[in-house]
Image (cartoon, rainbow, N blue to C red):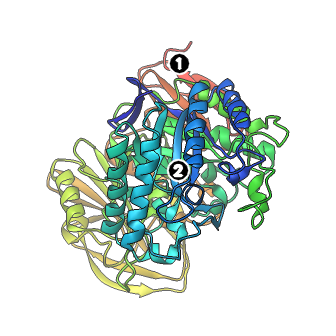
Amino acid sequence: MTFTVRNGRLWRDGAEFVAIGVNYHPSRAGCAIWTDWAPDVLAADFRRMAADGLNTVRLFVFWRDFEPAAGRYRAESFARLREAVRLAGAAGLACVLSVCTIFMNGQLLEPAWRRGENLWRDEETLRRQEEFVRRVARELSEVDNILALDLGDEIENVDPVAARGLGPAEVAAWRARLAAAIRAELPSALVVQATGATGVFGGSAFGVDNSAALDLVATHGFPLWAPGSVESTDSYKATNLVPFLVRFAAAYGAPFVDEFGSYGVDEPTAARYLRAAGASTIANGGNGLLAWCWQDITATGEPYRDRPNERAVGLRRPDGRAKPALAELRRLAASRELSGRSDRPPIAIYLPERVRGGGASYLDGEPGTIGAFYAYLLLKRAHLPFDLVSGPLDGYRLVLCPSVTRVTMTDLDRLRAHVDSGGVLYYSLGDHLHGFPGADLAGVELVDFRLDPGGESVLRWDDDEWPLHWPARQRSRVAATTATRLAGDDRAMVLDNRVGAGRVLFCSAPFERLLDRPGLLASGRWERFYRRIAELAGLRPAIGGADPDVEIVPKRGHAVVINHGVAPTRCELTWPGRADPVTVELAGKDWCVVREDVR
């Protein structure tokens, strides 16, 4: 097997490839896989994975089991690692290996010789990491089914305090140093470094936007611990969470979901979640989807003594019987049309350089990613195809900058170039000072801030209106200079400013961020606001006729249709250039592929 990445897509042996598989600990051994060695169990499990239609397995290389003393390696563990990879290859599975694994299920499985040294600043610790990843790569030089080596799953959780003190350049240098060590010994291996949802929503330097040294941008998130006011695992927002992470990561590289699943739910809920969120993740460009995890764990040692409920999230029960979610993963693995190519859309959500924040001074506001998440949801509910973009904006007709909390000169240069070339820019203000794009673009000037106790107002636009629920926080007072008012009043308004050959639609309220309340998004037709914006740019849905809870992902010659609602739905999809609609019926949290030429 030979794996490469081209134009944001993963390839195996010259063909596009989507890795569908599982994270793996043997049920009986758990995290003691390398010390409580049972190769027959691994071989049998790998064969069952392949029989289920899966193509990839992720294994964790617990550092302490391979380097029991600093600089002294346990040859037996490396031999077992090679055998495990070969057994997976014999079953036809590719392997993702998480090297330098210390953090697992909320506990630190530390090498005994470590004494709390800073993983990223202590030079001796850096040398130990570098030599260890070199040794792992060297030991695997004769196997051919390595998809990727992960530098360390959620490694920032090993020392969160130290990690918070790192700047982007330090993390970038750490990633580049270890990646170079791996490539020197195993040039065929792709390199990733897996992060949770904080790599998108948080301000940590371990973000998906700091992945230049990596081949794949690995991300994951679980509804139970998600920001964005996710109401439940069965909610609309929950099954859109990981697809959003994928689209966000795609703005910086080739996205890969290294962990995927749900905690604290019954089996039917877990199956519904995997069905809808999994289909949406692949349809939205995920190069991989690795479920957490293969089988319920019966082991009772570390880390399960502290968190025993981490053991019950497998796709199979302890006795090996399949749970309903496994059938849904099989179905995803069997579909070839979920990952089909899409044409470039005319709309982009622009991600400013500092969208994830990262500063800690009084000048730094909150990250802007919540605004981007709700912009994503609004466009999905409006059935308006779009990209998320972190660079130049050439070729897009409409660019959205939602609830901006920080804007740089580079951002302003890109936005100005877009408008000067005849594009339409929508920009909503998320921070009174550092989110303001300037009077020349906005067509307004800042008058003052005001700190209100919170409450409600209504944004009216002709016959449309949207109630805005304000928390007790600063609002911006603005006065028009060159812009004209389209909607609203002094509390929240939308203005139209003609700039160059284009126009700027400026919203003085953080419209998207104000939706971040449980139950609010589904309580009204908020997506109508984005449709009004799109209409001013001459844009309408590419495929219409569906309920807002139904996602439509247009592909070349077909569309992936996903019901993110829990209730069954019936839609009449209207295709451009097609006289008769296409009827689609879907159960709750279900999906299908609809061909454009279906009769």
What residue appears at the point 44 percent right and 20 percent down from the top-left corner?
557
Q: Earlier in the sequence, mark 1 or mark 2?
A: 2
Q: Is residue 505 above or below residue 187?
A: below
Q: Residues within 10 Å of mark 1 (few under 14, many from 20)?
A: few
* Direction from residue 165 to residue 107 in the image, left or right: right
Q: Amino acid at mark 2?
A: Ser
Residue furthest to the top: 599
Compared across the picture, whether 256 is left or right of 37 comes to left
The quarter holding residue 320 reads top right
Q: Where the N terminus falls, by quadrant?
A: top left
At horizontal 24% and vertical 41% (from top left) the residue drawn is 395
* Image position of 287 (left or right of 273): left
Q: In this rendering, is residue 576 above or below 568?
A: above
Can residue 599 be seen?
yes
Residue at the disc numbered 2: 98
Q: Disc 1 or disc 2, which is closer to the eye?
A: 2
Looking at the picture, which amino acid does disc 1 mark?
A: Asp
Pick the quarter of the image with the C terminus: top right
- Coordinates of residue 422 in the picture (x, y in percent): 19, 47
Residue 261 coordinates in the image, percent (x, y): 66, 48
| Residue linked to disc 1 | 580
10 Å neighbourhood of mark 2: few (<14), some, or many (≥20)?
A: many
Compared with 547, 233 (above or below) is: below
